[in-house]
Image (spheres, rainbow, N blue to C red):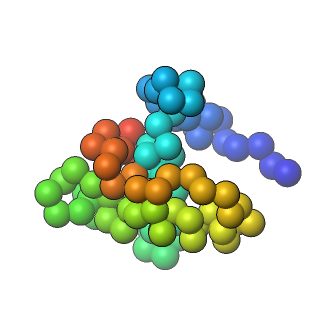
């Protein structure tokens, strides 16, 4: 298995840790998964294109979307029921 790129490791380590899991908020990871998945279909690097109306959420972020992304990689355990929709810091952490 290939190691993640250094840029990804730097981004992950820059995320604020939360008490619930002593790591990044699940919502931050979920929103990143949704954006990365969107980039596979539409490689638009203008971040605004990935923000939903209102400017506080990522387009398409939902628990079902995140579950489908993870399932495509063989991961079926529950992860983030809200899929990043309730993480108001998600867009700024993904950017």
Locate residue 72 relative to residue 85 in the image: left or right: right
Furthest toward the bottom, the residue is 41
The residue at the point 51 percent across, 62 percent down is 66
**In the image, residue 48 above or below residue 86:** below
Q: Nearer the viewer, residue 63 or 88?
A: 63
Locate residue 14 relative to residue 45 in the image: left or right: right
Q: Picture coordinates of residue 49 (x, y %)? A: 28, 64
In the rendered picture of this protein, how many numbered marks are placed on residues? 0
Q: Picture coordinates of residue 43 (x, y %)? A: 45, 68
Q: Picture coordinates of residue 16 (x, y %)? A: 44, 26
Locate residue 6 relative to residue 48 in the image: left or right: right
Q: Quadrant of residue 78?
A: bottom right
The residue at the point 28 percent across, 43 percent down is 88
Q: Picture coordinates of residue 58 (x, y %)? A: 32, 58
User: Which quadrant of the rendered structure holds the C terminus?
Assistant: top left
Asked if residue 14 shows in the view, the reply is: no
Asked if residue 79 shows in the view, the reply is: yes
Q: Quadrant of residue 54?
A: bottom left
Q: Quadrant of residue 13?
A: top right
Q: Nearer the viewer, residue 66 or 41?
A: 66
The residue at the point 34 percent across, 45 percent down is 87
The residue at the point 47 percent across, 26 percent down is 18
**In the image, residue 78 above or below residue 14:** below
**In the image, residue 85 above or below residue 65:** above
Furthest toward the right, the residue is 1
């Amino acid at each position: 298995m290939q190691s993640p790129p250094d840029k990804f490791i730097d981004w992950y380590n820059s995320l604020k840790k939360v008490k619930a899991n002593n790591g990044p908020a699940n919502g931050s990871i979920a929103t990143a998964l949704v954006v990365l998945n969107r980039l596979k279909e539409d490689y638009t690097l203008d971040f605004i294109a990935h923000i939903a109306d209102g400017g506080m959420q990522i387009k398409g972020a939902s628990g079902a979307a995140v579950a489908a992304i993870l399932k495509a990689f063989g991961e079926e355990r529950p992860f983030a029921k809200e899929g990043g929709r309730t993480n108001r810091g998600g867009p700024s952490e993904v950017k």
